[in-house]
Amino acid sequence: MQRNSRRTFLQQAAGSSLGLATAAWAGAAAARSANERIVLAVMGLRGRGASLAQDFAARPDCEVAYLADCDLNVVRARAPAVAEKQARPPQIVQDFRRALDDPAVDALVIATPDHWHALATVLACQAGKHVYVEKPASHTPWEGRKMVEAARKYNRVVQVGLQNRSAPYNHEALAYIASGKLGRIHLCRVFNQKLWANVDAAPDTAPPADLDWDMWLGPAPEAAYNVNHHNSWNHFWRYSGGDIINDGVHQMDLARWLIGKDYPRSVCCHGARFHSAGAHETPDTQVAVFEFDDLIMTFELTLYTPYMMKSDMELRNSDLFPYWPQNGTRVELYGSEGLMVAGRHGDGWQVFVRQKQRQPVIVAQGNGNFPDPEHQQNFCDAIRGIAPPTADIEEGHRSTLLCQYANISLRCGGRKLLIDPQSETTDDAQANTLLKREYRSPWVIPENV
């Protein structure tokens, strides 16, 4: 890394902020005071949203006023646990836009399938609401840029659920790199390895009672209800982009942050679903190569490897380090003076130098708990004007872009794509057709947000 880059990122680790994100945060209107409760609506309650709703409801400075989900059975089941954690129960709605119409609501928390992230964010910003949107930022590069434009135009805080940026120990790792102790970094390897089985094909059926399937589809192409699309949406191109973007974006964001890079010069990706036949479309084996001016970053994915482990919550919230060779979500940074291995969500980081008597030598390390509470605190602080968002939508968009470019190269037969950082387009006409999707009325993101 160049000296000026190190200095910039060291300042960031100490709590400074970056250009446009800082300006947008500083200009956010109607910031809440320290003793004023932040009123939230949570959209998407099947998985991650249920956890976020309970976490925010448990905070004394927040109130979850609305729970919104296309499936009323789901939201009804989640509501009691949220109600237990605050003074009054939340309202249950099937259409999240009812919450956006309420002037008392300050922010929308979005934990839907990926294809809904951008439109919900844009609509929330237009309604004057701040946004906490789960990763990945968007479904396509074009709509990710529209999310940034909406955040800036309406002076809203838009935080992406990339919690690693709020972990104190990761800021320590950033400072270690910025100090020059790791030396010059020319290779970064990113891994996303686990077991995620395929599913058998299933026939189209009528949607379950109390599920608004048309709203669930939203911006995605019209389709009959299919249980695989509903339950395994992560592995269908129309809703997501496979596990590189579902889970791998956490490691990609951590890696991009640590190496201090934005746009790659080129991207090339190969992969397929080799291991088992079934309904899933996205690959179970995938390798991508990203070229930067002085650094190569690789990404490797396997979904048939149960011996590669994501750390459980007990390990994440302890002072233990993973067994790195079989940690399925690690990042390796090869510097001229040492190797840094970093994990996500509480795994910490360690720096290894040349072995002595065939034993590992660790010269620096840092650890801490899963930084969910810190990330939620940062979102509240940003709304109150106390601190900028650590995972501002611009940063979340750029990290998501890496995953999207890789998938686009894959879908174009593995061709090498040259990236134009100004337009965020490629040199390949076919690839550029995948930068944006067709939207289904009325679920349309306008050109001018």
Image (cartoon, grey):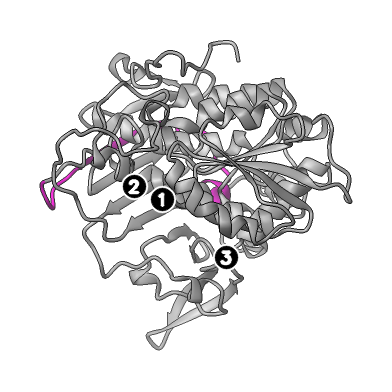
Q: 186 or 382, which is in the foreground?
A: 382
Q: Residue at x 59, y 38 (%)?
A: 395
Q: Is residue 29 above or below residue 169?
A: above
Disc nearer the start of the sequence (1/3): 1
- Mark sitting on residue 247: 1
How crowded pointer 2 is (Cα within 10 Å; few <14, some 14-19, many 20+) is rated as many
Q: Position of residue 14 (x, y in %)?
A: 76, 55
Residue 274, above or below 195: above
What residue is at 22 percent from the left and 49 percent from the top?
Answer: 285
Percent across and percent down for residue 275 are 13, 53
Q: Which residue is mark 3?
A: 370
> Residue 225: which quarter of the image?
top left
Q: Is residue 352 left or right of residue 37?
A: left
Classify mark 1: helix, strand or loop.
loop
Q: What residue is at 79 percent from the left and 31 percent from the top? A: 28
Q: Element type at marker 2?
A: helix
Counting other residues with Cα less than 10 Å from the Cα at mark 1, is it few (<14), some (14-19), or many (20 or more)?
A: some
- Which residue corresponds to mark 2? 243
Q: CA distance from mark 2 to mark 1?
A: 5 Å
- What whole-number distance in Å separates the C-alpha atoms at marks 3 and 2? 21 Å
> Is residue 267 covered in magenta?
yes
Q: Is residue 255 visible?
A: no
x, y (%) of residue 260? 58, 45
Which range is magenta?
A: 256-277
